[in-house]
Amino acid sequence: MRGWEANVRAVTPYTPGEQPKLSHVVKLNTNENPYPPSPLVAQKLKSFDPDTLRLYPDPAMSSLVQGLADRYGVDREQVFVGVGSDDVLSMAFLAFFNSGRPVLFPDITYSFYDVWAEVYGIPYEQIPLDRQFGIVKEDYRRENGGVVFPNPNAPTGAALALSEIEDILCHNRDVVVIVDEAYVDFGTASAIPLVEKYDNLLVVQTFSKSRSMAGLRVGFAVGSKKLIGYLYGVRNSVNSYTMNRFALELGACALKDEAYFRKTCQKIVNTRERVKKELAALGFVFPDSKANFIFASHPAYDAKKLFEALRQQHIFVRYFEKPRISSYLRITVGTDEQMDILLAFLKKYMKKETPDGRFS
Ligand code: PMP
């Protein structure tokens, strides 16, 4: 190792799901929305004036921030926006987890949390989920430098009730508690109403899932004015123009189509509930998902082999070769047609392959 290498901030980065270059794939591996964004977004894009790209975007990001404040019934000073919720979460780790004490998050959770902790040099402790993959609220009563968890959790899909989140907040008044609500719109109560009561609560959401805009990169956080002020302080010390003109305009536009948003979310929830029944009938087991994915395992079939067999058919799901979850597949809820293709393949696969893994 050369001298300079000893002082490099070397990290093992987060590995995002595959974005296959093939056409005609059934893409159920990165929790994207199978439906397009609101038609208002397409209209807005057509009328976008490229001449405006000469100019820097609005540093106050007023259109998007005000749209979010109106939609969620908070003041604009309570809203932070970023380049996807990954950017929001990363800034929040940098701003708030600075005590030297370990930040707590579940052992099975969004696999970016430990990466941010590593890159920023934040100590952390991973708290085991229970055997049913549930977060145990009592486990978050120990000394810590902050708490972060998704609700519903990823990749399990299991959700905490608002009362359980409030219990975690009650026992953690002197640290920042981040609730990552990337999947909240698929049937979980948001913790946003609690920000009035707890000035140390930061609720993070995204346009990537329920608003079908993963490619636009828009995420946001709602919290007390004080918390949000600190977050902008850090963001503006790193990069003040993170939000480009497309993200600001198209994001604000999507917020205006509440009816489309609700309809799309409901379609995904309906498909999820149907697919749960079909998977259960095939013998799969899974935590009761409240997200746009199902984390499923089959007692008789090897998950990795199944993942590879699906991939050969151009059906992409996500597999994590990690302790406790290596027998599970995370299956994004797509359209009914996509899920039918998946289910048809599973039925065929199970007929052809004996449970011990040998093809008959
Ligand atoms: N939180 C969780 C739990 C996620 O699964 C994801 C998606 N990878 C994100 C945050 C980040 O999503 P985005 O940056 O697209 O908003």
Image: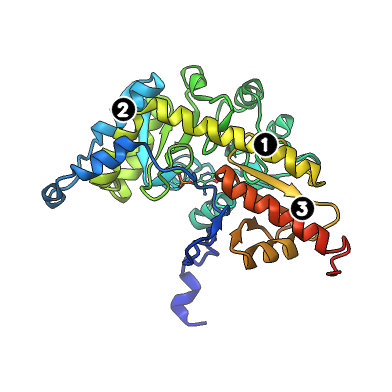
Q: Amino acid at mark 2?
A: Gly
Q: Is residue 60 above or below residue 28?
A: above
Disc 3 marks which residue? 324
Within the image, what quadrant is residue 139 found in?
Answer: top right
Q: Is mark 3 within 8 Å of ligand 1?
A: no
Q: Amino acid at mark 1?
A: Arg
Within the image, what quadrant is residue 148 found in?
Answer: top right
Disc 1 marks which residue? 274
Scheme of colours in the image: rainbow
Compared across the picture, whether 266 is left or right of 276 comes to: left
At 66% from the left edge and 62% from the top edge, which residue is drawn?
310
Q: Position of residue 233 (x, y in %)?
A: 33, 39
**Which of pointers 3 and 1 lies earlier in the amino acid sequence?**
1
Q: Amino acid at mark 3?
A: Arg
Cα distance between the residues tagged 2 and 3: 41 Å
Compared across the picture, whether 143 is left or right of 49 comes to: right
Disc 2 marks which residue? 67
Q: Residue furthest bottom?
A: 2
